Image: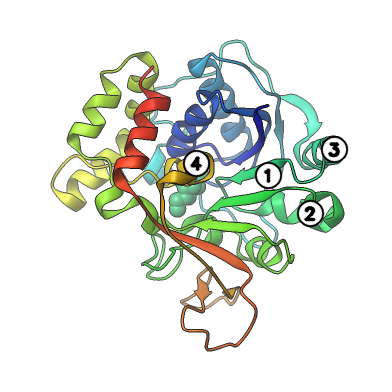
């Protein structure tokens, strides 16, 4: 019996690598993919998702559009990190797959209602707008999910869009707040810190994937903008792959090193700490922990899982 998952994505170049991992792990069945604006526009994220499924070419779960805008914040697309098309600006487009016309959020709820209770994991790789709206529309259906894994927060480290905020949370803080306050018991945040330091892909890792075949070449080349930025930042070839780290933690939990449940609070103020997530490590608040924070992976386990699912 395969473990069933739903992926929600703002499909940029690191989301694409994460989706490819999931599509290549035979232990899992991706029931559907919902898209959300974030790295790029909703339409672009949807095309990028379809393109990725074509490149992986294993099976083709339905892709549905979700929210084109955030709950209460204008969009700041991450073109500098992923390219104007989110996929390294090669001009790649899906050639035959089309997205389904149904609404992605309603479809997520429908799938959760149809499948047996607590048998589906949701893996969210973009701003939490779709997830928040789904909780608002029908919390009982969302609570039928087994686990919700989110690439989001700066974990126990620093931010990537401000000193304290990570992009997915910062892009829609109100949505993140709604999800954290939903009371869902198995909410896991994989922080940006989980893909840094010894979990960065180095030159050898990058070469191993990019020379392994067509898919490996694709998932590396579409991250060329980030490679260029990192060459400046770190004077060498490195890739901090946030969504792949989150996907690995969700699908290959043997790679999780540091994971603990804390009381978390999302800052929706419009000040310098907007979009940060206060993680009450030292329990100052005395409040009940409400989310797990995965802040470090075991590099060998993480990277071997990447190689296993991408080097095809
Ligand atoms: O902060 C990194 C996250 O923001 C990743 O999910 C990336 O794809 C962007 O959505
Ligand atoms: Ca993403």
SS at mark 4?
helix
Question: Badge 2: how crowded within 10 Å, few (<14), some, or many (20+)?
Answer: many
Mark toward the start of the polypeptide (3 vs 2): 3
Please indicate whether residue 170 sits to the left or right of residue 148 in the image. left
Within-10-Å neighbours for mark 4: few <14, some 14–19, many 20+: many
Measured in 3D between alpha carbons, the distance from the residue under mark 4 to the one under mark 1, in whole angstroms, is 23 Å
Q: Indicate the position of residue 271 as horizontal and vertical percent values.
A: 51, 78
Answer whether residue 263 is visible to the viewer in this image: yes
| Helix, strand or loop under label 1 | loop
Residue at numbered disc 1: 68
For the N terminus, the image quarter is: top right
**What residue is shown at x 82% (from left), y 38% (from top)?**
116
Q: Residues at badges 2 and 4 in contact (C-beta under 8 Å)?
A: no
Q: Disc 2 designates what residue?
A: 143
**Picture disc at residue 45:** none
- Mark 3 nearby-residue class (10 Å; few <14, some 14–19, many ≥20): few
Task: Point out residue 84 in the picture as x, y percentages from the top left corner.
Answer: 44, 36
Residue at position x 78%, y 56% in the image: 135
Residue on which the image places disc 3: 110
Say if 251 sits above or below 152 in the image: above
């Amino acid at each position: 019996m395969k473990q069933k998952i739903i992926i929600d994505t703002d499909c940029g170049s690191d989301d694409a690598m994460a989706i490819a991992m999931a599509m290549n792990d035979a232990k899992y069945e991706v029931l559907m993919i919902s898209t959300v604006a974030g790295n790029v526009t909703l339409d672009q994220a949807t095309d990028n998702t379809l393109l990725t499924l074509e490149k992986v070419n294993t099976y083709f779960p339905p892709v549905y559009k979700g929210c084109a805008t955030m709950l209460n914040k204008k969009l700041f697309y991450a073109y500098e990190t992923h390219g104007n098309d989110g996929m390294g600006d090669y001009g790649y487009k899906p050639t035959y797959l089309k997205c389904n016309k149904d609404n992605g959020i309603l479809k997520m709820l429908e799938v959760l209602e149809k499948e047996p209770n607590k048998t589906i994991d949701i893996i969210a790789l973009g701003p939490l707008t779709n997830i928040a709206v789904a909780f608002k529309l029908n919390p009982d259906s969302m609570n039928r999910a087994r686990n919700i894994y989110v690439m989001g927060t700066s974990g126990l480290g620093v931010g990537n869009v401000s000193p304290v905020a990570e992009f997915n949370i910062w892009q829609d803080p109100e949505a993140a707040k709604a999800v954290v306050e939903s009371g869902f018991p198995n909410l896991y945040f994989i922080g940006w810190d989980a893909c840094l330091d010894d979990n960065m892909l180095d030159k050898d890792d990058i070469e191993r994937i990019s020379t392994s075949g067509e898919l490996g070449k694709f998932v590396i080349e579409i991250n060329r903008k980030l490679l260029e930025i990192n060459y400046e930042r770190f004077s060498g070839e490195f890739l901090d792959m946030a969504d792949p780290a989150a996907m690995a933690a969700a699908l290959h939990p043997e790679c999780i090193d540091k994971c603990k449940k804390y009381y978390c609070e999302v800052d929706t103020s419009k000040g310098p700490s907007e979009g940060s997530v206060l993680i009450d490590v030292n329990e100052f608040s005395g409040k009940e922990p409400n989310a797990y924070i995965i802040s470090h992976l075991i590099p060998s386990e993480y990277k071997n899982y990447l190689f296993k699912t991408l080097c095809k």
